[in-house]
Image: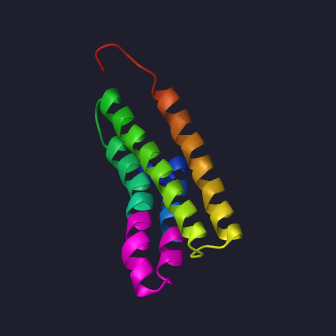
């Protein structure tokens, strides 16, 4: 299966694009501070999924999925901060947080499906 066919990767890519579109509307200071942080964290979700997918050993693949999950949680924190600073509406933040929760569930499912094999 190609990386682009993985639902978890598709959702992670959508998250990054949605957050980018929101952040690019913010004023200069907010774009450069919180905007840069939330975009990097969100883009890191898909980037780590793809890096892990390109690994040949299960342990390495899982490690990058753990990184992706950590980036998803970091993204949630930045979204909460953006909402508290009135950069995102309640509706926008809830939609993004819900999508990230779904992505985390997909990442967890992928981690479990890989399992653990001795020597891998």
Q: Nearer the viewer, residue 68 or 2?
A: 68
Residue 57 in the image: above or below residue 12? above
Q: Position of residue 66 (x, y in %)?
A: 41, 38
Residue 19 lies in the magenta-colored region: yes
Q: Nearer the viewer, residue 42 or 54?
A: 42
Residue 29 lies in the magenta-colored region: yes
| Residue extent of the magenta highlight | 18-39
Q: Position of residue 67 (x, y in %)?
A: 38, 43
Which residue is located at x 46 percent, y 86 percent? 27
Q: Nearer the viewer, residue 117 or 29?
A: 29
Residue 47 in the image: above or below residue 32? above
Q: Position of residue 104 (x, y in %)?
A: 55, 44
Residue 115 in the image: above or below residue 52? above
Q: How is the image coloured?
A: rainbow
Q: Is residue 6 visible?
A: no
User: What type of secondary structure mainly makes up the magenta span?
Assistant: helix
On screen, residue 67 versus residue 104, left or right, reads left
> Which corner quadrant holds the C terminus?
top left
Which residue is located at x 51 percent, y 27 percent? 112
Seen from this angle, which residue lies furthest front?
85
Which residue is located at x 40 percent, y 82 percent? 29
Q: Is residue 118 visible?
A: yes
Seen from this angle, which residue lies furthest top?
118
- How many numbered circles are shown? 0
Q: Nearer the viewer, residue 72 or 58?
A: 72
Which residue is located at x 47 percent, y 81 percent? 24
Residue 56's quadrant in the figure? top left
Q: Position of residue 113 (x, y in %)?
A: 51, 28
């Amino acid at each position: 299966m190609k990386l682009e066919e993985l639902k978890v990767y598709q959702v992670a890519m959508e998250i990054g694009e949605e957050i980018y579109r929101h952040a690019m509307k913010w004023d200069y200071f907010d774009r450069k501070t919180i905007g840069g942080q939330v975009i990097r964290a969100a883009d890191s979700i898909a980037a780590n999924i793809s890096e892990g997918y390109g690994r040949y050993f299960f342990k390495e693949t899982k490690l990058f999925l753990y990184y992706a999950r950590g980036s998803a949680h970091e993204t949630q924190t930045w979204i909460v901060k953006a909402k508290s600073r009135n950069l995102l509406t309640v509706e926008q933040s809830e939609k993004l947080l819900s999508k990230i929760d779904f992505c985390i569930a997909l990442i967890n499912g992928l981690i479990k499906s890989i399992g653990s094999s001795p020597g891998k």
